[in-house]
Image (cartoon, grey):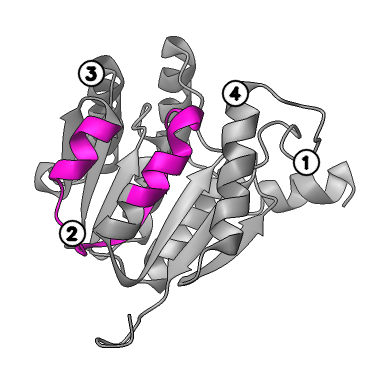
Amino acid sequence: MSPTSWTFAETYIAEDDVLDAARARAEEVGAVAVGSGAGAALRFLAAVLEARAVVEIGTGAGVSGLWLLRGMRPDGVLTTVDVEAEHQRLARETFKDEGIAPQRVRTIAGRALDVLPRLTDGHYDIVFADGDKREYGAYLAEALRLLRPGGVVAFDNALWHDRVADPAQRDDETVAIRSLVQEVAATDGLVPVLLPVGDGLLMAKKVWIPEGDE
């Protein structure tokens, strides 16, 4: 794909003033937000699933959370986890700018791998991960527990600045993401897809298995 076509696709769904302001907040604190193409894909996913309950790992300044909320059901609740409480304060400003009712967003400050085990099994329609890349494999294990049958896990930065596709790149983050991509493809009970939007968006549907067939 040419850079011109990639840019055209990436900006196909235009962002508005609320998202622009959220991106500005993210830049101020050094939080790298999802690209507009990945955000649009997340909104589409939430809309297709008519998502009512979503977990987000990595709140940032609320860019990805806002995309998700725009696709979710009007009564849907986003549970978003971030180790930085200041990031979550900025995200709440974003959600307030959008006019989202406070009860629709549950912000939890803390390490994802400390928080996720406390969430309810089989309750969530989507688990979206954009946290510590070295922990992506552990996030997958938690997501498979948290998702309902038919739910979807999604990971941002699945191509990681073109490093994942280059076997010569062996830094910890690249190796962790590469291992995740391979594990998702090889896991029975998942239907995966890797989309070249933003910095790469890996998604996988948790297949419904009738009781007694497990």
Query: Where, by quadrant of the figure, is residue 18 drawn?
Result: top left
Write the start and end of the magenta stretch as one range.
Answer: 113-141
Secondary structure at numbered mark 1 = loop
Which of the two discs, 3 and 4, sits closer to the camera? 4
Which callout, 1 or 2, points at the residue further toward the start of the chain?
Answer: 2
Q: Say whether marks 4 and 1 touch (CB < 8 Å).
A: no
Q: Which residue is mark 2?
A: 121
Q: What residue did someone put label 1 on?
A: 165
Q: Is residue 180 left or right of residue 31?
A: right
Q: Residue at x 34, y 38 (%)?
A: 57
What residue type is disc 4 on?
A: Asp
Left or right of 82 in this view: 205:
right
What residue is shown with label 3?
85
Was residue 131 drawn as part of the magenta stretch in this picture? Answer: yes
Q: Residue at x 86, y 42 (%)?
A: 3
Q: Nearer the viewer, mark 4 or mark 1?
A: 4
Q: Provide the secondary structure element on which disc 2 rests.
A: loop
As helix, strand or loop, the secondary structure at mark 3 comes to helix
